[in-house]
Amino acid sequence: MPDELNHLPLIQRVLAREKATPGALLPILHAIQAGAGYIPDSAIAEIAHALNLSLAEVHGVISFYHDFRTTPPARHTLRLCRAESCQSRGAEALAAQLREQLGLDDHGTCADGSVSLRPVYCLGACACSPALELDGQVHARLTPERLQALLQSCREEVKAC
């Protein structure tokens, strides 16, 4: 909770700027996440009060959109494409490799917050399948060896989950 209190000025600034805007909930959520890295629990009540919504309505929107986070993000995020083109070029085997080497499920995060694994259903690199996004950078024509090298680059900073 002390960390969440650090975000109170950000939350108040965003609410003051956006609350009168029609359809303000999504822009508010995006702005808070952009500033804090996630949507702190303390923001939910503030948003609900400012927009005259119930806590359930705010929670419902946050949980509906998979890109909103309610916990701080991991230092590294791996998003492996699982769409048809990447599936046909071996994405499922790469997903199994990631799960085994990281010891995570598809939506898992290491206990120390170092690495997060997220499936995604198109990175726009279909012509270069299979593709993975690591910390916002797309890596295409991925092979098990290239995936291993990417994981190693993460692990130089982070020893294990």
Image (spheres, rainbow, N blue to C red):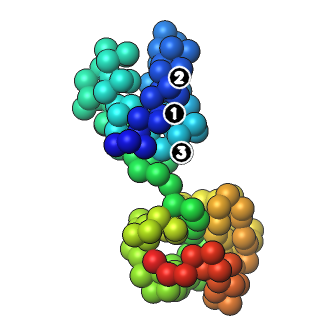
Which residue in the protein does label 1 denote? 32
Q: Is residue 110 above or below residue 122?
A: below
For mark 1, does the 10 Å Cα neighbourhood hold few (<14), some (14 to 19), or many (20 or more) residues? many
In the rendered image, which quarter is residue 107 located in?
bottom left
Q: Is residue 119 visible?
A: no
**Could you say which is closer to the camera, residue 89 or residue 143?**
143
Task: Looking at this view, name the residue that lies furthest to the bottom.
Answer: 145
Identify the mark at residue 14; answer none if there is no mark: 2
Q: Is residue 127 visible?
A: yes
Element assignment for label 3: loop
**Could you say which is closer to the camera, residue 107 or residue 112?**
112
Identify the mark at residue 60; answer none if there is no mark: none
Which residue in the protein does label 3 denote? 37
Which callout, 1 or 3, points at the residue further toward the start of the chain? 1
The type of residue carrying mark 2 is: Val
Task: Identify the residue at horizontal 41%, vertical 76% (top origin).
Answer: 104
For mark 2, does the 10 Å Cα neighbourhood hold few (<14), some (14 to 19), or many (20 or more) residues? some
- The reply, left or right, for residue 139 in relation to residue 61 is right
Q: Is residue 121 above or below residue 80?
A: above
Q: Is residue 105 above or below residue 138?
A: below
- The reply, left or right, for residue 59 in relation to residue 134 is left
Q: Are marks 2 and 3 in contact (CB under 8 Å)?
A: no
**So how many labels did they put on this image?**
3
The type of residue carrying mark 3 is: Gly
In space, the residues marked 1 and 3 are separated at their CA atoms by: 8 Å
Q: Are marks 1 and 2 in contact (CB under 8 Å)?
A: yes
Task: Identify the residue at horizontal 41%, vertical 50% (top origin).
Answer: 71
Which callout, 2 or 3, points at the residue further toward the start of the chain? 2
The type of residue carrying mark 1 is: Ile
In the rendered image, which quarter is residue 157 located in?
bottom right
**Residue 123 position within the rendered picture, expressed as x and y whole percent measured from the top left:** 64, 59
- The reply, left or right, for residue 146 in relation to residue 51 is right
